[in-house]
Amino acid sequence: MELWLASVKAFVNDQRAGFPEGALSFVDRLVDHSEAPEGLLALAWLLEEKDGSVSPEVARRLVDLTGGLIAREEFPPSVIQAVDLDGTWRD
């Protein structure tokens, strides 16, 4: 569990580029309060809003880190498309 949480935090930190300072504070709070999958979902939507889409690599990692705890239809369209294309979606 600690290794997974460290992976989630590292992933969130890797995505900070291009966001103003404090823009991911909601994501950080969710991750820090045992709501990491929801934090990753919020991050996915923030990335989609900022960039217009989420890259396939980031999309696959987001879905992998949520471990199937977030329903497919809750993710932004670019995440669903990227993960559906490579067949790695977990139901």
Image (cartoon, helix red, strand yellow):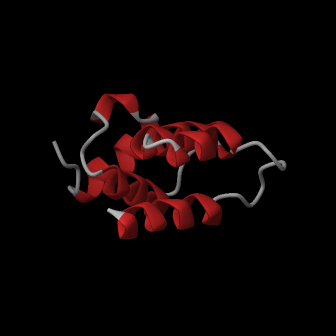
The quadrant in which residue 71 appears is top left
What residue is drawn where x is 27% and y is 40%? 69
Residue 3 x, y percent position in the rendering? 38, 70
Residue 54 x, y percent position in the rendering? 53, 50
What residue is drawn where x is 36% and y is 44%? 81
Q: Which quadrant is the N terminus positioned in?
A: bottom left
**Which residue is at the front of the view, 49 or 30?**
30
**Which residue is at the front of the view, 53 or 41?**
41
The quadrant in which residue 2 appears is bottom left
Residue 50 x, y percent position in the rendering? 70, 42
Residue 44 x, y percent position in the rendering? 52, 43
State the count of labels: 0
Q: Is residue 51 left or right of residue 90?
A: right
Q: Residue furthest bottom?
A: 3
What residue is drawn where x is 29% and y is 35%? 72
Q: Is residue 1 left or right of residue 78?
A: left
Vertical position of residue 38 compared to residue 4: above or below: above
What residue is drawn where x is 79% and y is 45%? 22
**Which residue is at the front of the view, 51 or 44?**
44
Q: Is residue 49 left or right of residue 5?
A: right
Q: Which quadrant is the C terminus positioned in?
A: top left
